[in-house]
Amino acid sequence: MRPLQPASRVAVVLSSALGDSLLMMIVVRNLRENGMTVSVFGRNAVTLAAWFPGIDIQPELTSDTARTLLPGFDHVIAMRRNGPIADSALPLTDLILLEPACRARSTKSMADRLMHFCRDELGLADAVKHNGMTAPAGLQPRRFHNRIAIHPTASTHDKCWLPSRFIRLALRLRKLGFQPQFVVAPQERAAWTHVESYGIGLPELGSLDNVAAWIYESGWFIGNDSGIGHLASCLQVPTLSLFMRRGLARTWQPGWGIGRVVIGGYLPTARLRERYWKYTLSVSRVARAFQQLQEALA
């Protein structure tokens, strides 16, 4: 792959997943820092546009808008060739895919991989890892320093620790003087209202923009392998992430602020670990990992 030229016009088509979108914004920032004119297309990015000042962020592409808009760019960067990208009939010479960097054997986190991709594959000098996400005026980082944002859901059920253990963890942390509150999507809320009977908060946050603001002002984050975990890390909130397997944690752990990961207990095969990790991960182990996260900030 030849290095991109500074005057290039580049379209970056984000994934529909929040975590992938935030990671791909690393590429956006490095392109702009190296003189490219960049337009971003993505559903989550549009919602978070105020957090990425100065960036041309447009709605998620459809098959029709992809065919209309993408031929006007010198290069198009996407995670993979699917959806509207596949329908756009773009020449392969104009398309740069990030999926090979994601699938490559590496001990680096995805945030580090994409930073190195910018430097080694795109030829962008002095590549950085942070994606440039900036809090709007009026918000204070970690304003509610005792508030712990707990995210008990994920994109798939197999990534989720047991709900009862999240509740037990929250009650344990409350006894230590923290204010644990569960953050879930509006469509998930009905399944979690029972936590309020334990005196655990369940704020109605609505849009992703409001979720970002609320997490930014929280003191801590604990959650499953999910896009919200990446969001917290990107906002420099100390993050504890729960993973089913060490290999997944190595690759997909949030890669920005101070954070730790904790995985399920030993099981002999990947299949068993994926199926039973949530039963082998105890509340005590997660609580100890959170204590270690606190000590890292001391």
Image: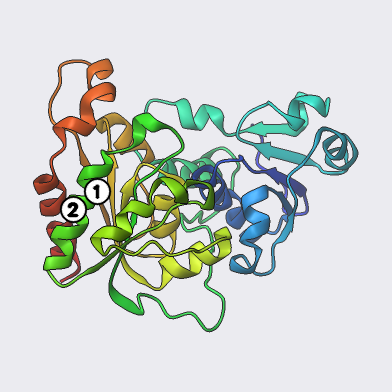
Q: Secondary structure at mark 1?
A: helix
Task: Give the residue drawn at x 35%, y 39%.
Answer: 108
Which label is found at residue 166?
Answer: 1
Task: Give the residue drawn at x 51%, y 54%.
Answer: 127
Relative image position of residue 61 (x, y in whole percent): 77, 41
Q: Is residue 138 above or below residue 184?
A: below
Relative image position of residue 152 (x, y in whole percent): 34, 47
Residues at circles 1 and 2 in contact by the CB criterion of under 8 Å: yes
- Side of 255 relative to 274 (left or right): right
- The Cα atoms of the two marked residues, 1 and 2, are separated by 5 Å
> Which scheme is used to colour this image of the protein?
rainbow
- Give the camera-side residue of 73 and 69: 69
- Side of 129 relative to 150 (left or right): right
Is residue 91 something one can see in this rendering? no
Which label is found at residue 169?
Answer: 2
The amino acid type found where label 1 is placed reads: Phe
| Outermost residue toward the right in this view | 68
Task: Give the residue drawn at x 14%, y 46%.
Answer: 283
For the N terminus, the quadrant is top right
The amino acid type found where label 2 is placed reads: Leu
